[in-house]
Amino acid sequence: MRVVIQRVKNASVKVNNKIVSKIFFGLLVFVGFSVNDDEKDIDWIAMKILGLRIFNDKNYKMNFSIMDVSGELLIVSQFTLLASSKRGNRPSYSLAARPENAKKLFDNFIKRLKKKSGLNVASGIFGSDMKVNLLNDGPVTIIMDSKNRL
């Protein structure tokens, strides 16, 4: 499971030219699932996201988590995070979970974040052609992989 986490002032997702989700302050999380991911990966990533101290205190030091600042989360599926470009110029997506399994993991990930945080957790529409708009704050961008926990 790979995620790209961006601290944002606001973010929204459009599908078919219609806004389907938006947040006003918090984290935009792009998530991709691999063929080997399971509930343990979801738990680990969810807890890391909720505990990340990447929001500024009054001295502009990153000391606060999304929980501390009562921010919002916008979760967007993105299988291309599992792309391999080791050979040639056309990326391979053979490591990405099949859509039916990835959808279950995506839904469980959102449920887990909602349950563990109590925060507003919005999402894009799995498998859709989405247009994502964001105002990155900082910028602060963190990349995590549940298979690389060191």
Image (spheres, rainbow, N blue to C red):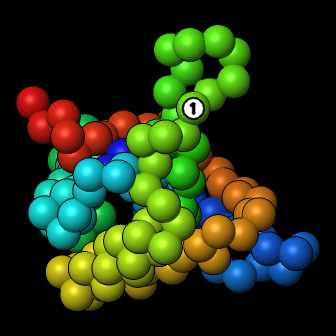
Q: Count neighbours of disc 1 (C-alpha within 10 A) and say few if under 14, some if 14 to 19, many if 20 or more.
A: some
The part of the image, by quadrant, that contains residue 124 is bottom right
User: Is residue 24 visible from the viewing direction of this image?
Assistant: no
Count of numbered circles on the image: 1
Pointer 1 residue: 92
Near-viewer residue (45 or 88): 88
| Left or right: 54 in relation to 19 | left
User: Does 52 appear above or below 77?
Assistant: above
Residue ID at (19%, 58%): 41
User: Is residue 146 visible from the viewing direction of this image?
Assistant: yes
Which quadrant does the C terminus fall into? top left
The part of the image, by quadrant, that contains residue 140 is top left
Residue at the extreme right of the image, as rendered? 17
Label 1's element? loop
Residue ID at (13%, 63%): 40
| Left or right: 3 in relation to 48 | right
**Residue 118 place in picture, x, y as percent:** 26, 87
**Residue 14 place in picture, x, y as percent:** 77, 71
**Residue 134 place in picture, x, y as percent:** 66, 54
User: Does 67 appear above or below 5?
Assistant: below
Residue ID at (74%, 63%): 130
Residue ID at (36%, 37%): 143
**Residue 128 place in picture, x, y as percent:** 71, 69
Residue type at mark 1: give it: Ser
User: Does 70 appear above or below 11?
Assistant: below
Near-viewer residue (66 or 56): 66
